[in-house]
Image (cartoon, helix red, strand yellow):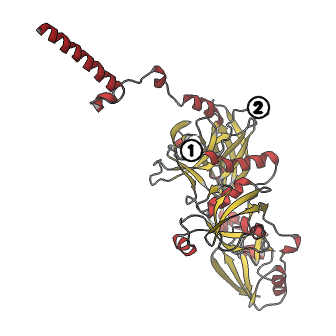
Amino acid sequence: MMSMLRCVLGRFGCLKGALVAILVMLGHGTSPATAQRQPPPSKAAMQYSFAPIVRKATPAVVNVYVESTARVVRSPLFADPFFREFFGRQFAPRRRRQNSLGSGVIVNESGLIVTNTHVVKSSGEAEVRVVLADRREFKADIVQQDEKTDIALIKIRGAGAKFPFIRFADSDAVEVGDLVLAIGNPFGVGQTVTSGIVSALARTGVSRSDAQVFIQTDAAINPGNSGGALVDMEGRLVGINTAIFSKSGGSLGIGFAIPANLVRLYVNSVMTGRKVERPWLGARLETVTRDAAKELGLARVAGAVVAQIDDKGPAARAGVRPGDVIVVVDGRPVEDARAALYRMTTRGVGNSSVLGLLRNGRRREVTLALVPAPGPSADDIRLLQGRHPLHGARVSNIRPKLVEELELEVSDGVVVIDVAYASTAAELGFRQGDVIVQVGRVEIGDVNRLERVLSSRQSVWFVAVRRGSQILRLEMPG
């Protein structure tokens, strides 16, 4: 009897042990520490890796080296040959070499590379070199750069060679939580790959430019990564790494990339020879604030409110009115004015966008034609000459294209578009973008009035100029 009991208990103990082992393998054991130390369930699970994506993408990510030479003058006086001759050659302007480092992404087989403007921009003559992942080295030429978007394109001098390149992803299809890899040359240590996720979309508060909207990622991005690739799990280009949020200079898990759909516009412009143009709305948009949302009766503090409108612009023709709130562009919600402008920019001039508006609490849709901003005509432009402070300045009536290009804060009046070297206007400090507000006691509304005022003799010239948000005043003998 005892032997039979021992046999039953023994079998029960064996059965219990087997059940416990099975539960532990399934992750439901009574000991969490034991469960965490179990080996992978299969050999295939041990081989999960980003290596296939890295092998596909890294050959098209390059290191960009820029060496420039800038003239350094110790004092403005020594720019004059007379002073150099008198004081000796030791005070002549000297050349100082400057070096910068970044990354870039080859986007077609002929060697066209996308990088950041701040990587290749220099204060003098620049020599650009790129080093491929296989250590081949080439010289390159800067073919396009835009400071507003921080996008630059350079071309390898490859003598007809074919290069590895990355294909574009649709950055509008990217979602928060998607896995991404950042590839670049941080701190100049060599090509490096880091992994992370997309942590936010349509970030707009990162820079002062209204043309910049970013993808945010926690993949480590450090100095030297600028211009490098942010790729998806198919090895396609999601964005161009461009900035980090950091108090130490190193990665804190908040990096920003320019979306691929915006980058593609600039690549296409080089391929087709057409300049990138931003759509002209004929309206001024402002981001909805908490106070504005309350006043307009909005349920969310989001969207772009139409603050001002040009009666002859495309927005007015589409039926948009002052006070309307744009909440959707082409089916995609927009959080602020920059996001709305970004959606229309990537849609492209020559197409149209469907805007979802809120007006008096009701939702409506309008179709907006995306057209370029009209520029000045020949009748708008004057070269000023004579015995007055603005001799040598080329001025124009302000037109929408000039407002955009010169980032003017006013939309009416007369603006300086160029200043001749060593002219009276240049010596007095006038420069491109200055808006002539007043000459003498006459307010200036157009170039015809400005010419008439300048043609009269004055014992003392008084000129008021708007420069940015400041008003500058000049007085000089006639």
Task: Give the secondary structure at mark 1.
Answer: loop
Question: Where residue 212 sits in the image (x, y, percent)?
Answer: 63, 57
Q: Which residue is mark 1?
A: 225
Determine which quarter of the picture holds residue 301. bottom right
Quadrant housing the N terminus: top left
Question: Where residue 264 sits in the image (x, y, percent)?
Answer: 71, 47
Using a 10 Å C-alpha cutoff, classify the residue at mark 1 as few (fewer than 14 neighbours), some (14 to 19) or many (20 or more).
many
Amino acid type indicated by mark 1:
Asn
- Residue 453 visible in rendering: yes
Residue found at x 49% / y 24%: 47
- Residue 210 visible in rendering: no
Residue found at x 70% / y 40%: 107
Question: Distance between the Cα atoms at labels 2 and 1?
Answer: 26 Å
Amino acid type indicated by mark 2:
Ala
Task: Give the secondary structure at mark 2.
Answer: loop
Residue sticking out furthest to the left:
2
Question: Where residue 394 sits in the image (x, y, percent)?
Answer: 81, 72
**In screen coordinates, is 289 left or right of 451?**
left
Q: Is the C-beta separation of discs 2 and 1 under 8 Å?
A: no
Q: Which residue is mark 2?
A: 161
Residue sticking out furthest to the front:
1
**In screen coordinates, is 29 left or right of 248?**
left
